[in-house]
Image (tube, rainbow, N blue to C red):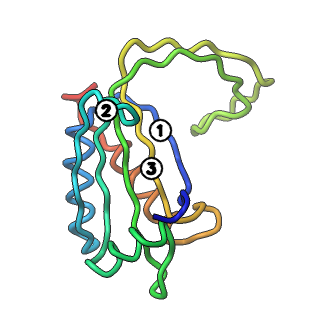
């Protein structure tokens, strides 16, 4: 196996894993990608993580096993979502807020305290800023997280 490759992109949200994975599978089918689901229980490294590994075809999957995350000649590659239910307690410094308001403010610290939420790590073949494919997949994942669904709030 090659040394670790891939670009990690983390998300924290209130969207449950079953909902996110169900919607993600629909998106994968729409772009002709296959997926492999793995659920761990009390694993030394993955704890209780759930993984959804995505690939276009057998050749891409096998190439990934040999060389790791990469972009192929057609500009695509394998990617994965690693998910777990977790708590989140952290301090963050806000520099900007992404919304429609024209509120301006100086950077300040906020304390985040969530006893239960869902953590997702999107593993991409390259940084989204350097790859249109990785950017497309990240945006597709964000669209799942941004979907309105009152039953999961």
Cβ atoms under marks 1 and 3 closer than 8 Å: yes
Circle 3 residues within 10 Å: few <14, some 14–19, many ≥20 = many
Circle 1 residues within 10 Å: few <14, some 14–19, many ≥20 = few
Q: Separation of disc 2 and disc 1 at Cα? A: 22 Å
Q: Compare residues 133 and 60 and report the one nearer the observer.
A: 60
Q: Separation of disc 1 and disc 3 at Cα? A: 8 Å
Q: Secondary structure at mark 1?
A: strand
Q: Earlier in the sequence, mark 2 or mark 3?
A: 2
> What residue would you read off at disc 1?
11
Cβ atoms under marks 2 and 3 closer than 8 Å: no
> Which residue is pictured at 39% across the width and 12% down the height?
115
> Which residue is pictured at 33% across the width and 72% down the height?
61
Q: Which numbered tag is attached to residue 122?
A: 3
Residue 132 coordinates in the image, percent (x, y): 54, 71
Residue 99 sits in quarter: top right
Q: Secondary structure at mark 3?
A: strand
Work out whether 124 lies above or below 82.
below
Circle 2 residues within 10 Å: few <14, some 14–19, many ≥20 = few
> What residue would you read off at disc 2?
43
> Which residue is pictured at 58% across the width and 61% down the height?
128
> Which residue is pictured at 40% across the width and 61% down the height?
79
Q: Compare residues 117 and 99 and report the one nearer the observer.
A: 117
Q: Compare residues 9 and 149 and report the one nearer the observer.
A: 9
Question: In the shown orientation, is residue 56 left or right of residue 106?
Answer: left
Residue 118 coordinates in the image, percent (x, y): 36, 29
Looking at the rendered image, the disc whose residue lies closer to the viewer, 1 or 3, is 3
């Amino acid at each position: 196996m090659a040394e670790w490759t891939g670009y990690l992109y983390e998300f924290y949200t209130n969207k449950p894993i079953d909902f996110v994975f169900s919607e993600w599978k629909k998106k994968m089918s729409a772009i002709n990608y296959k997926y492999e689901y793995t659920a761990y229980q009390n694993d030394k490294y993955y704890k209780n993580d759930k993984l959804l590994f995505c690939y276009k075809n057998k050749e891409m999957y096998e190439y990934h096993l040999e060389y790791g995350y990469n972009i192929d000649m057609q500009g695509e590659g394998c990617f994965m979502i690693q998910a777990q239910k977790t708590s989140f307690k952290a301090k963050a410094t806000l520099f900007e807020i992404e919304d429609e308001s024209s509120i301006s403010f100086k950077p300040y610290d906020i304390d985040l305290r969530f006893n239960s939420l869902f953590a997702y790590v999107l593993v991409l073949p390259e940084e989204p800023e350097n790859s249109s494919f990785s950017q497309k997949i990240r945006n597709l994942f964000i669209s799942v997280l941004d979907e309105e669904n009152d039953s999961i709030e």
